[in-house]
Image (cartoon, rainbow, N blue to C red):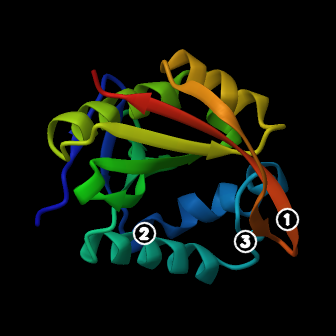
Amino acid sequence: MIYPVLETERLLLRQLAPDDAEDLFEYFSLDEVMEYYDLETFKTLGDAQNIIRHFNNEFEKGKGFRWALELKSDKKVIGTCGYHNWYPEHFRAEIGYELNPKFWRNSYMKEAILSILTFGFESMRLHRVDAFIDPSNISSEKLLHSLNFKDEGTLRDYFFEKGRFVDAKIFGLINK
């Protein structure tokens, strides 16, 4: 399967490439980005290279897509978003995303997610999209509400991350 390329007004959504490692390391190495992520803050460029390989391997295995969010204006990768835990037989997948803090509060992620939701509902034949967030991640909650995701409750001690159990708030969006 050829990796789908999506385009928005300001972004090109494309497959991650090895050359993107420096752009990813720029923000994956920041504690403020990794606070709600299930990985430790990146210490080396190799960490960024590994996550690029991981995301691309998930695509090769048919488990999901993770797009690089490239600014059309200067070809810089400012974040990623995509689907994982894709279950075609159940017509559902989980969405995940992160963004370089230099670009927070400019609606880049909303723009990107709207594009991948259209792709998910039309091309992947999804009926449902899930999102799990840390209950204290208010910015992510606001983003999901702005995209019409519904808060479906809090799952106590749902994930084990960074040596401790953490709650997860689940949001869902149904294609009607």
The structure residue drawn at horizontal position 77% and vertical position 71%, both measured from the top left corner, is 40
The outermost residue toward the left is: 1
Instruction: Tell me where residue 91 appears, x and y as whole percent.
Output: 27, 48
Residue under label 2 = 55
Instruction: Tell me where residue 81 appears, x and y as whole percent.
Output: 46, 47
Instruction: Tell me where residue 79 appears, x and y as whole percent.
Output: 53, 48
The structure residue drawn at horizontal position 57% and vertical position 60%, both measured from the top left corner, is 24
Q: Vertically, is 37 above or below 131? A: below
Instruction: Tell me where residue 122 appears, x and y as whole percent.
Output: 16, 35
Residue under label 1 = 165
Mark nearest the camera among 2 and 1 is 1
158 vs 163, left or right, is: left
Residue at mark 3 to residue at mark 2: CA–CA distance? 16 Å
Residue under label 3 = 42
Q: Nearer the viewer, residue 122 or 87?
A: 87
Residue at mark 1 to residue at mark 3: CA–CA distance? 21 Å
- Mark 3 burial class by Cα count in 10 Å: few <14, some 14-19, many 20+: some
